[in-house]
Every structure is written in structure tokens, then in C-alpha cells.
Image: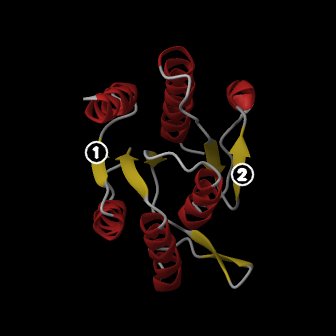
Amino acid sequence: MDPYDYTRFTAAKKVALALESLIRLQFPRDKLYIVGFGDYARELKVQDLPYVTVGPEHTNTQGGLELARKLLNRDRSANRQIILITDGKPTAATINGRLYIHTWGVHPAILEATFLEALRCRKSGITINTFMLADDYYLVDFVHRLTQICQGRAFYTTPHRLGEYVIIDYINKKKKHIV
């Protein structure tokens, strides 16, 4: 496993913990769900985050978006958003109930499943803001296309500046809804 993978994963965990603390203290009526996704997506509890590790799994962005959409659909608040922190192009998707994996380049079926899920999120009134931690051509292209489909925003950053970007964006979005 590339040491940089650990740096990016650790940065994402720190941001999730900071965002949870900010929401709990400053915006207690907001709800935060944390979704981790490798081969499969799963909801993570904040108290478990320090113990979650990066594994030799794939990147199932479609599964992560699907689970996030289902969790957010329980909450009918006006401002529902997915903060997608990613460092890899999608290499897995659940298609017709089965996990499909393709690690070399990007596979059209995985992209199609992921973009379809992004469209479902948009139709459910959920904004997707993507924070990208790598500058791989395939990932940049994927994030650009994803952002167009879901009509969200994309931020290109580093693990060291990720927290600053996410927290400031969250607070600025809250200020827009308050004013």
C-alpha cells in the first residue's frame, strides 16, 4: 500500500471528525452520516473512525453515493448534501446486484453506474460536493463529469489543506441559508 494512501485516508478521517465536532457544537440540528466505501459502502460511526483503516480494496463510488442517498432520504431537511472525499477513480460498482471490479483504467459500465447514481442523488434534491485528493487524469475527468451530472461543485486540494476546504465550505453554505 502506498504511504500516500494512508496520508489521504488519515486526512479524510480527521476532516470527518472535525466536521462532526463543528456540527455537534455549532449546528446541532444538522445530521451527519459518514459513509466509507471500498469494495462495498458502509455507514461508519464517528466513535469508530479512529480505528478504521485503509485496506487493499477498490473504489466503489457508486455504492458510497447510493448509501449516502438512502441515508439522506430519511431526512427531509432543505439542505441535504454529500461531501464526497475521494482519491481514486471508480474501480468498482454494484451492477444488477453484483459487485463488478475493473482496476485498469476506467470501465464504461462502472462510470455509467456511478453517474446514474449521481443523477438519482440530484433528482432526490441532494447536492454532491466533491473534494479530490489526487490529480490523476482519469480522476480529474471523472470528477468533472460527475460534477456536471449532479450540478454540484468540485474542489481540488491536498491532504494537508482538505480540512480547511471542507470546513470553510460547510460554514459558508450554512451562512447562505441563514441570511
Along the line of sight, the residue nearer the viewer: 92 or 117: 117
Label 2: element kind: strand
Residue at point 42%, 65% (across, down)? 122
Q: Are marks 1 and 2 in contact (CB under 8 Å)?
A: no
Question: Element under label 1?
Answer: strand
Examine the rendered structure and indicate whether residue 31 appears above or below residue 55.
Answer: above
The vertical placement of 133 against 39, above or below, is: above
Question: Where's residue 154, x and y in %?
Answer: 29, 51
C-alpha distance separating marks 1 and 2: 25 Å
Categorize mark 1 by other alpha carbons within 10 Å: few (<14), some (14-19), many (20+).
Answer: some
Numbered tag placed on residue 156 in the rendering: 1
Residue in the foreground of this view, choosing between 68 and 56: 68
Is residue 73 visible to the viewer in this orientation of the structure? yes
For the point 26% across and 34% down, the residue is 176
Report the residue at 33% width, 70% height from top. 149
* Lower sequence index among marks 1 and 2: 2
Is the C terminus in the top left, top right, bottom left or bottom right quadrant? top left
Side (left or right) of 167 relative to 114? left
Dot 1 amino acid type: Tyr
Q: Nearer the viewer, mark 1 or mark 2?
A: 2
Place of residue 10 in the rendered image (x, y in percent of width and height, measured from the top left):
55, 30
178 over 147 or under it: above or below: above
The image quarter containing residue 13 is top right
Q: Which amino acid, by three-letter code, is at mark 2? A: Arg
The residue that disc 2 covers is 42
x then y, percent, for residue 94: 66, 75
Image quadrant in which you'd find residue 24: top right
